[in-house]
Image: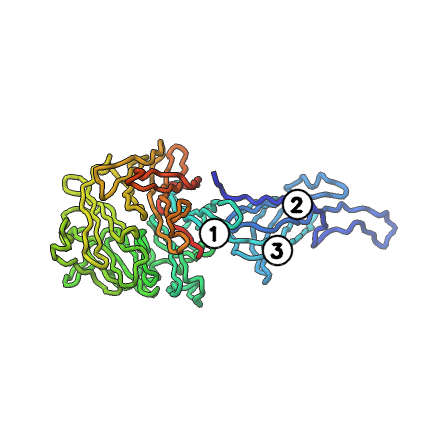
C-alpha cells in the first residue's frame, strides 16, 4: 500500500542559536559575585535538504541547557514558530509547534528554514536558520485520481518520479485556497496538451502567457470547474472555467467534463459539456462560443447526451459524433462549423440502422484508435442492450449493429474499449465482463473484485508516442479499474493488461496497483514528453 511520503529529518549537529541569547556570564561595576546564566543550545538543523511538494516535512530540534535542563521540559513557557524564506526574503509560516510536522504547500524552489522560540518567562527570543531546504515537484508524471472522500472531492496523484518508487500525493487541491472550503461532487479530471498553442484565456493571473500554458489539467465538480497549472496543480478564482466564456456566471456554471469525455481530441480545439445538454467548442484556445448542439436548418437546439465520439488524435478536419437524446439520432459536428449535420440517408451507408432515427436511448459512447470506429451502447424499449459500431467522423460507414446478451448487461454501470483488440468491457457491481462486436454471443467474466464495487473502467488516451506501442508494460494499453470498499472507505486503482479476445478471452493480467483513495470517479494522466 502506498501512502504519502513522510520526510523525517532528525538532526544531530549542535550549534548556538543565532539571535537574542544570554551571554555565558555577566558582571557589573559593583562589588558583586559573578553569576552564571543558564545557556540554552539547539542543534543546527543540518540535514534539512529535500522535501516533495505536498508531502509532510518532519524536523525534531534537540535542545540542551548548561545548568538547569528542567526548563526544557516546561513546554508551557515557550512559543515556537517555523518559517520558510525565499532568496528574495519572502517568508511563509509553516507551523507553531516545537516539532515541525507539516504539509509543504510551498512552490517548488529553494528556501531557508527558520526556527524561532520565545521564552514567555524571561522574554528571551531565540532564532536559528538553516539554508538548503529544497522543495521539489511531487507531481512530475503519473495518474491523477479524482475521488469522493466522505462527500468531499479530492484530487490525488500517483507519482512516477525518476529513480524513486511511485508515491501517492494526497489532496493536491488543498494548496488552492480559492476553491470552496469543502469541494463536493467530483465529476471529471482531464489533462490537456498542445505542442504549439498556449491555453491563454485566462492565463495565469491574467498576466503574461508562458510555456506552462501549453499544458493544463481541468477538474469538474458539482460546484464548478477549474483549470490547474500542470506543474504544481494549483488554481485560483480567475481560472474558473466560466471565465473562459464571455458571459458565464461562475456561481451557477457547473460543467460535467472538459475535453471529449475520454476520446482523443486535436489540441487546437477543446470541448465542454455543461451537464444540461449543451456542447461548447473553444477554438485555438480562445474563448468558448455558442453551443454547437444545433442542426443545420433547425431553429431549436437539441439536448446532447453527455458523450463525445472522436477518433484518437483526429486531425482538425475530423468530426465529432454527438447524440440527440430527444430525436434519438447520431449527428456529425465538424470543428469550427458552429452547427451539426445529419448523416446522409443513402442506404449504402446505413445497412444496419438509421443514423437519423435509432429509436433507442444512448447508454455510453466512445471512439477508439483500434479501428477508427465509434462504439455506442444503446438501450431499446424492451430494456435490451445493443452495440452500434460505426464511423461518421469522416465517412458514414457502419460496421456492426448487434444485440448484447452478456451476463447482467442491462445492469452495467461502466464500459471501456480496448484500443488494441476492440474488446468491450463492462462492469456490474464487483465484476468485470468482456465481449466483442464480432462475437456478441460470447461473454467472459475477467475480474471479480469480491466485496468491492467497481467505480471506474477506462483505457486512457495518451498523447506522447512513448505510450503508444503494444508492449504489455506500456500504460497506454492498461485497462484501469477503480474499486471501492464501503467497509473501510478505501478506493483502489489497478492497471491490467488485456489479452486478445479471440485467443485468450480478454484475460486480465495485473500490472500495477495503488490504494488509499476515496470512491474513484475519474482519472487522467499527467504526461511527460
Q: Name the residue under label 3.
A: 112
Q: Between residues 327 and 487, which one lies in front from this camera angle?
A: 327
Question: Is 375 placed left or right of 353 in the picture?
Answer: right
Give above or below for 356 relative to 502. Answer: below
Residue shown at the point (48%, 53%) measured from the top left: 140
Quadrant position of residue 441:
top left
Of the two numbered discs 2 and 1 on the same chain, state the one appearing first in sequence: 2
Secondary structure of the residue carrying numbered label 2: loop
Farthest-out residue, right: 31
Dot 2 or dot 3: first in sequence order is 2
Marks 1/3: CA–CA distance = 22 Å
Could you say which quadrant of the image residue 429 lies in? top left
Residue at figure coordinates x 35%, y 54% from the top left: 225
- Measuring from the top left, give residue 499's x and y in whole percent: 34, 41
Give the alpha-carbon distance from disc 2 to disc 1, as whole Å: 27 Å
Across and down, in percent, residue 186 comes to 35, 47
The residue that label 1 is drawn on is 139
State the residue position of label 2.
11
Say which of 413 and 433 sits in front. Answer: 433
Mark yes or no: residue 252 visible.
Answer: no
Looking at the image, residue 407 sits to the left or right of residue 174; the answer is left
Amino acid at each position: 500500500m502506498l501512502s504519502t511520503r513522510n520526510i523525517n529529518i532528525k538532526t544531530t549537529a549542535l550549534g548556538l542559536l543565532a539571535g537574542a541569547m544570554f551571554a555565558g556570564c555577566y558582571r557589573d561595576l559593583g562589588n558583586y559575585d559573578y553569576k552564571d546564566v543558564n545557556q540554552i543550545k539547539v542543534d543546527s538543523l543540518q540535514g534539512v535538504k529535500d522535501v516533495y511538494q505536498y508531502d509532510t516535512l518532519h524536523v525534531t530540534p534537540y535542545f540542551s541547557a548548561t545548568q538547569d535542563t528542567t526548563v526544557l521540559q516546561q513546554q508551557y513557557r515557550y512559543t515556537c514558530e517555523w518559517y520558510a524564506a525565499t532568496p528574495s526574503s519572502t517568508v511563509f509560516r509553516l507551523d507553531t509547534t516545537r516539532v515541525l510536522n507539516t504539509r509543504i504547500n510551498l512552490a517548488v524552489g529553494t528556501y531557508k528554514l527558520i526556527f524561532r522560540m520565545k521564552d514567555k518567562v524571561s522574554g528571551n527570543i531565540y532564532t536559528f536558520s538553516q539554508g538548503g531546504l529544497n522543495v521539489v515537484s511531487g507531481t512530475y508524471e503519473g495518474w491523477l485520481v479524482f475521488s469522493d472522500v466522505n462527500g468531499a472531492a479530492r484530487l490525488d496523484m500517483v507519482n512516477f518520479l525518476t529513480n524513486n518508487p511511485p508515491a501517492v500525493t494526497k489532496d493536491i487541491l488543498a494548496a488552492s485556497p480559492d476553491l470552496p472550503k469543502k469541494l463536493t461532487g467530483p465529476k471529471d479530471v482531464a489533462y490537456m496538451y498542445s505542442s504549439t498553442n498556449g491555453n491563454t484565456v485566462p492565463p495565469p493571473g491574467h498576466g503574461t502567457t508562458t510555456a506552462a500554458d501549453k499544458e493544463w489539467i481541468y477538474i469538474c465538480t458539482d460546484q464548478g470547474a477549474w483549470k490547474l497549472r500542470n506543474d504544481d496543480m494549483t488554481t485560483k478564482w480567475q481560472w474558473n472555467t466560466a471565465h473562459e466564456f464571455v458571459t458565464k456566471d461562475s456561481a451557477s456554471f457547473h460543467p460535467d467534463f472538459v475535453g471529449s469525455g475520454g476520446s482523443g481530441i486535436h489540441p487546437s480545439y477543446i470541448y465542454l459539456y455543461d451537464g444540461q445538454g449543451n456542447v461548447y467548442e473553444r477554438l485555438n484556445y480562445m474563448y468558448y462560443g455558442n453551443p454547437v448542439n444545433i442542426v443545420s436548418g433547425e431553429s431549436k437546439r437539441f439536448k446532447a447526451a453527455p458523450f463525445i465520439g472522436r477518433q484518437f488524435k483526429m486531425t482538425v478536419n475530423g468530426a465529432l459524433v454527438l447524440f440527440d437524446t430527444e430525436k434519438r439520432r447520431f449527428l456529425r459536428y465538424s470543428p469550427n462549423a458552429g452547427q451539426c449535420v445529419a448523416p446522409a440517408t443513402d442506404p449504402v451507408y446505413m445497412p444496419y440502422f438509421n443514423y437519423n432515427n435509432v429509436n433507442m436511448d444512448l447508454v455510453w459512447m466512445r471512439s477508439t484508435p483500434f479501428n477508427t470506429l465509434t462504439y455506442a451502447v444503446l438501450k431499446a424499449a424492451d430494456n435490451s442492450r445493443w452495440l452500434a459500431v460505426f464511423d461518421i467522423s469522416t465517412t458514414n460507414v457502419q460496421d456492426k449493429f448487434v444485440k448484447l446478451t452478456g451476463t447482467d448487461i442491462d445492469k452495467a454501470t461502466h464500459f471501456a474499449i480496448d484500443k488494441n483488440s476492440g474488446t468491450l468491457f463492462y462492469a456490474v457491481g464487483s465484476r468485470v465482463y468482456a465481449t466483442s462486436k464480432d462475437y456478441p454471443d460470447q461473454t467472459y467474466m475477467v475480474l471479480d473484485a469480491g466485496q468491492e464495487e467497481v467505480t471506474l473502467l477506462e483505457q486512457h488516451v495518451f498523447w506522447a508516442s512513448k505510450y503508444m506501442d503494444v508492449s504489455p508494460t506500456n500504460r497506454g494499453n492498461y485497462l484501469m479499474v477503480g474499486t471501492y470498499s464501503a467497509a473501510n472507505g478505501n478506493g483502489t486503482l489497478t492497471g491490467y493488461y488485456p489479452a486478445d479476445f479471440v485467443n485468450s478471452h480478454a484475460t486480465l493480467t495485473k500490472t500495477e496497483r495503488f490504494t488509499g483513495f476515496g470512491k474513484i470517479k475519474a482519472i487522467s494522466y499527467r504526461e511527460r514528453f
